[in-house]
Amino acid sequence: MLGGRIMTQTNKYLGLPMASGKSKVATFKDLQEKITKRVMGWKEKFISKAGREVLIKTVAQAIPTYAMSIFKLPKSMCDNINSLLAKYWWGQTKEERKIHWINWKKLCTQKKEGGMGFRDLHSFNLAMLSKQAWRLIHDTDSLFYKVYKARYFPNSSFMMANVGNNPSFVWRSLLAARDIIFRGSKWRVDEDARQWDRGKLDAMFSQRTREEILSIPLDHLQSQDTLVWIENAAQKFSVKTAYRVALRSSTQSWVEHSGAREDGPTWNKVWDLKVPPKVRMFLWRVVSNCLPTRDKLHQRRVNVDTRCEFCLHNTETVHHILWECPFAQNVWALFSGRTQKCSNVVSDFFLLFRQMRSKLSQQELEKWAVTAWAIWAARNKFYFQHYQTHPKVIADMVCGLLAEYQRFMDTQGQD
Ligand SMILES: [Zn+2]
């Protein structure tokens, strides 16, 4: 029996009794502590964002999927873990506050949607639960369905069920996922299903009884209709699409972020470039409009001089530091061809990148990206270590890095 086994396995998973009247928060504290310890143990303060991405994604694996598909984890726990990971991503340690340029929910969207593909625990939890809920609607032959139907909704459907008296934690968890089902599906009214089966009626009842039965309106019997998943073309429920629904419904705020563009091919291109991960990550930040230039810091109320430190003249915007500043110009001048001509006066880098993507070949685009990255790296070296790199050295580094990465990819047999 599913109901009984759930409890035993959970006891084993979390090492805490579920039925002892302990609060949910206390029950899951153990798990939260485990994860916190793990994240705190990541000492590599200067690890690249590409490295952080990998580490953050391992946390998702630390949580038993089984528990996630049966229990609704306390919202406070999800919030705490999300906040811990967000701080780690933006490089925040205990002593210092760091700007979170993009909010966590946005980072949790897929890469082709401009996010990092991190997992928002709360949304993922709801998606996993809604998979079970979906079974309670469609898989009516299963033992799982029969047990829950008898106990919680003998006279209605799962979608109509009430919480009832003395509900179990599992039942309340399943009901929490109902909202995802509501949002991700629609009722398909099956007109045929709305008719009484006249053949059967004729065979089983007398004329009078038949007439009585036929006079019963069927309109209110909604369970006759089929609930159809509308989040993918196949109309087939999946945790992946349910996760998207959960993420979407949990907040609207990330949509306001200026980099949140609905343009899969452009975002995919960022991640498809055959350049080192750190360059792709850099490009993602540029295109997401969250490179911490002086003007951006100023917008975030950080007390800084907004001028470019190279020319001490213009405001340091992304466009200025990567293209317009004489320092950057000197680097671009060392490359012949179309690459340098393409970076015109465009202040929106999502649009700029989209434009570059259509104008340049894959190779040119890769060189362009690595050059922009190298200029930014040289800028940081100058700003933070007061070391000025010669344009020729930057250009050589670009070629070296590209060649080295190319060789690496060849040995991996991926190119
Ligand atoms: Zn400048």
Image (tube, helix red, strand yellow):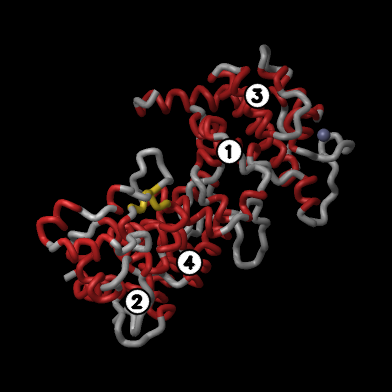
Residue type, numbered disc 1:
Glu
- Residue 78 numbered mark, or none: 4
Q: Earlier in the sequence, mark 1 or mark 2?
A: 2
Residue furthest bottom in the image = 21
Q: Amino acid at mark 2?
A: Phe
Q: Secondary structure at mark 3?
A: helix
Distance between mark 2 and mark 3 Cα atoms: 52 Å
- Structural distance between the alpha carbons of marks 1 and 3: 16 Å
Say few, some or many: other residues with alpha carbon within 10 Å of mark 1 (under 14 / 14 to 19 / 20 or more).
few
Name which residue lies at 53% across and 34% down. 264
- Closest to the observer: 8 or 270? 8
Of circles 1 and 4, the one toward us is 1
Question: How far separated are the C-alphas under marks 1 and 2?
Answer: 38 Å
Give the amino acid type for the residue marked by disc 4 in the picture. Answer: Cys
| Front label number (1 vs 3) | 1
Structural distance between the alpha carbons of marks 4 and 2 = 17 Å
Q: Secondary structure at mark 2?
A: helix
Q: Residue at x 44, y 68 (%)?
A: 37
Q: Secondary structure at mark 4?
A: helix
Which residue, given by chain and number where applicable, does mark 1 sit on?
A: 262
Rounded to the nearest angstrom, the CA distance separating label 1 from label 4 is 27 Å
